[in-house]
Image (tube, helix red, strand yellow):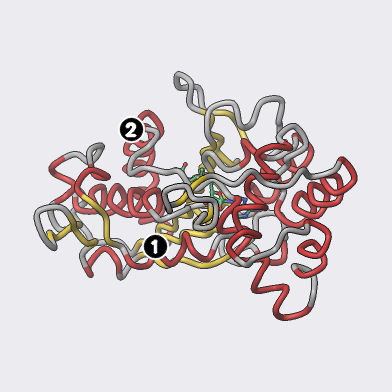
Amino acid sequence: MYNNATTGETPGWRYKAPPQLSEQQFERWQTLLERRTGISFSLHKSILQAGLYRRMYEIGSEDYEAYFDSVQDGAAGFLEWGELLNRITVQETRFFRDMAAFEFLDGYLLQRMEELKHRGDTLELWSAGCASGEEAWSLAMQARSCIEQQSEPMYYGVIGTDISNAALTTARQAEYREKQLVNLKPRLRSGNLESLDSDRCRITEALADRVCFVQSNLVSAEELLGIDMDVIFCQNVLIYFRQSSKYKVLDCLVDHLKPGGMLVVGQGESVGWTHESVSRVRSGQLEAYIRQ
Ligand SMILES: C[S@@+](CC[C@H](N)C(=O)[O-])C[C@H]1O[C@@H](n2cnc3c(N)ncnc32)[C@H](O)[C@@H]1O
């Protein structure tokens, strides 16, 4: 988009088509992005081109080659890479997005908490690829609600991770508009959300105390969390990965489950994947696995 004040047209914003990404440039960009993030644009050249140019336009660059070099150039390149990721990752999300998965989670948590109580263990949940936080907050609300049904209190913690620091900033702000809360059962609002005005609300301190957001890349095993989890939700993230990278991430996530812990992915995201340490949950369309 640019403000065309010289052509005599009514000044204003109008669309400016991105310069054409050559096959060679496409190959270099696609390879770099996939190696660093797992996200494959191999079948989506125009989406990659539009995403790259969105950022290049902001910084006044018209040259895919020069921009390619700049994102790999030292500390400045590191920061610019983060900016680019914020623009090319799909960050669509919702509270309780996959209702069937959350309904299954409810029953699972009640049973799991009995086991943890006997072991004197705490309840740990992870939203991997949490975008602006809605999935992590949903997990926290669900865990809190299950714990409140118990006779004894239990410690729980939720971690939300994402590769995009802009998404994590929104998640940490913990403020949402009323229209974003349509999936929320009224009983889950109480104690978890407070109104700021007629249109906006904020996560309460009581819930926020149990949730933290950390930048982490699912394709870099060394960046993954060092603690084992009872529940991992990784939904609508691996959909953009090639099958081999997807399977690698799923294997890594299994390594981060406690025995008896549950991994939940989005529909169709684990097709063809098997792992000797997990068994598939049989419940409708749910793609969930329990670690032996
Ligand atoms: C469509 S959102 C899904 C959000 C949430 N899980 C849900 O289902 O509503 C996908 C998120 O995955 C993140 N993501 C993509 N590649 C990633 C990677 N390699 N490591 C961590 N997060 C990644 C993106 O930044 C984005 O926020």
Residue 139 percent across, percent down from the top left? 36, 49
The answer to whether residue 261 is seen in the rendering is: no
Residue that appears at 85% across and 43% down? 22
For label 2, the residue is 103
Residue nearest the viewer, comparing 16 with 172: 16
Residue that appears at 44% across and 58% down? 124
Query: Relative to residue 69, is residue 146 depicted above or below?
Result: above
Residue type at the position of mark 2 = Glu
Query: Relative to residue 133, is residue 112 depicted above or below?
Result: above
Mark closest to the chain's N terminus, 2 or 1: 2
Residue 74 percent across, percent down from the top left? 78, 79
Q: Quadrant of residue 164?
A: bottom right
Residue nearest the viewer, comparing 174 with 69: 69
Callout in the foreground (2, 1): 1
Spatial distance from mark 2 to mark 1, Cα to Cα?
A: 26 Å
Residue 289 percent across, percent down from the top left? 56, 35
